Amino acid sequence: MGNSESSSQFPPPPSDHDAKKFTERGRGGERESTESSSAGKALAAVAGGALLALGAYSLASPSDHDAKKFTERGRGGERESTESSSAGKALAAVAGPGGALLALGAYSLASSSSSDSDSSDEERAVAKMEKLRLGGFPTSYGSGNSDEPSFSRMIKILSYNVWFREDVEVHERMKAIGKIIQQHSPDVIFFQEVTPYIYDIFQSSNWRKAYECSVLPEQAKNRRYFSMLLSKLPVTQFRSKRFENSTMGRELCVAAIEAGAGKKLIVATSHLESPTPGTMNSAERVAQAEEALRLLNFADNVVFGGDMNWVEAPNADGPFPLLDGWYDPWSVLKPGEDGWTYDVKSNGMLRGMRPFRTRLDRFACKLADFKPVGIRMVGTEAIPGISWYNKGKVLPVLPSDHYGLLLTICPV
């Protein structure tokens, strides 16, 4: 949940003077650069390709001089750069409505101001993007699984708000979450409310060695708490975008992963704005959900999940704002079941807190090449032999104040 616990159409392209700021951790180290129109032209040349993109945000500027900041990681480094609007316009022309707008990896294309070099720049860009389209990246790198994934296999995705309360048996709780991970062996993990201390606990855990992580150790030190993605499957790139309307530092975290047979799967997590004493922050939360889905809508295969802090009551958030082609796998696979991932009644650790039972955590899917085949809550049992004191009561300890969600998808 967050602070209270411690208790489609895209906008028009930007103008020629618009610039966007972002940080990318690619395969070649850190650098700062600007992308000239040659990169945009090159991307236009691969209009028919499957451009792995997170680019709706490049078209979302309200004014000519507006700038937005992004963080992007790949397999070898990190950089900060500005992207000129000419490239954005070229991408918009390539993609068309709802298309792939800003290719993942396009930012690493070197561009030149010399007209004599435009042709070679474009050729290199086309070759790079064609490699992306064909799934040409090696499948063994980092700390992830070195075996090329088989497209016939099931993919498990775990979402878990781990509860940032370090004063409540944090080591035992993180150990219990580790056991859940070892038991179910998810291919992808979405974590929310990770503190630097919890991050360090995870880093020293045996299960962690199997996963590539979206957050570097030096990045983890600088934030009170955050969301992060982990994957056993080969990751093309990680990227994150802060929600501009968030007063809590909330963001959208995204990864493009290789699911086998050249198939790409976009996975994303977020921790949407939390209710706080005196305000539900519903308008902010709904706007964040709408923005996330709009940004992710470019892809054919997307799984978005996390702690949405969603309250479906009519006087609160209402129905989750799914776009055409998107669906809620819990509603599909378990119609009629409540699915309350935050439940003061069933979670004995929360006794004495305000009565609240709702499906804060959820997935939203848009899948052309996959289908959901299973979804369940995990972490619903108390940890044996562990207790904590709250308001004069001895209470059991569960892995978190939220239950985790485990989604299984398989190829169609």
Image: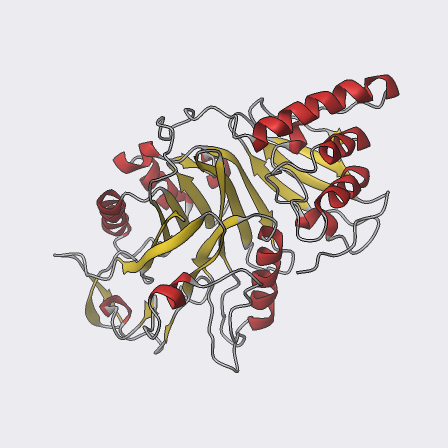
Is 262 placed left or right of 152 in the picture? right
Is 232 placed left or right of 24 in the picture? left
Image location of residue 130, percent across then percent down: 62, 28
Please tell me which residue lies in front, 248 or 324. 324
Image location of residue 322, percent across then percent down: 54, 65
| Residue located at (52% from left, 47% from top) | 253
Quadrant in the picture for the N terminus: bottom left
Residue 15 visible from this viewpoint: yes
Residue 192 visible from this viewpoint: no
Q: Residue placed farthest to the left in the image?
A: 385
Q: Quadrant of residue 279?
A: bottom right
As drawn, 273 above or below 15:
below
Image location of residue 164, percent across then percent down: 38, 55
| Residue located at (65% from left, 23% from top) | 127
Please tell me which residue lies in front, 81 or 142. 142
As drawn, 364 above or below 259:
below
| Residue located at (51% from left, 28% from top) | 75
Q: Quadrant of residue 29?
A: top right
Image location of residue 378, percent across then percent down: 27, 57
| Residue located at (57% from left, 67% from top) | 286
Q: Quadrant of residue 373?
A: bottom left
As drawn, 190 above or below 397:
above
Q: Residue placed farthest to the bottom in the image?
A: 315
Please tell me which residue lies in front, 35 or 381. 35
Q: Residue placed farthest to the front in the image?
A: 412
Please tell me which residue lies in front, 376 or 403. 376
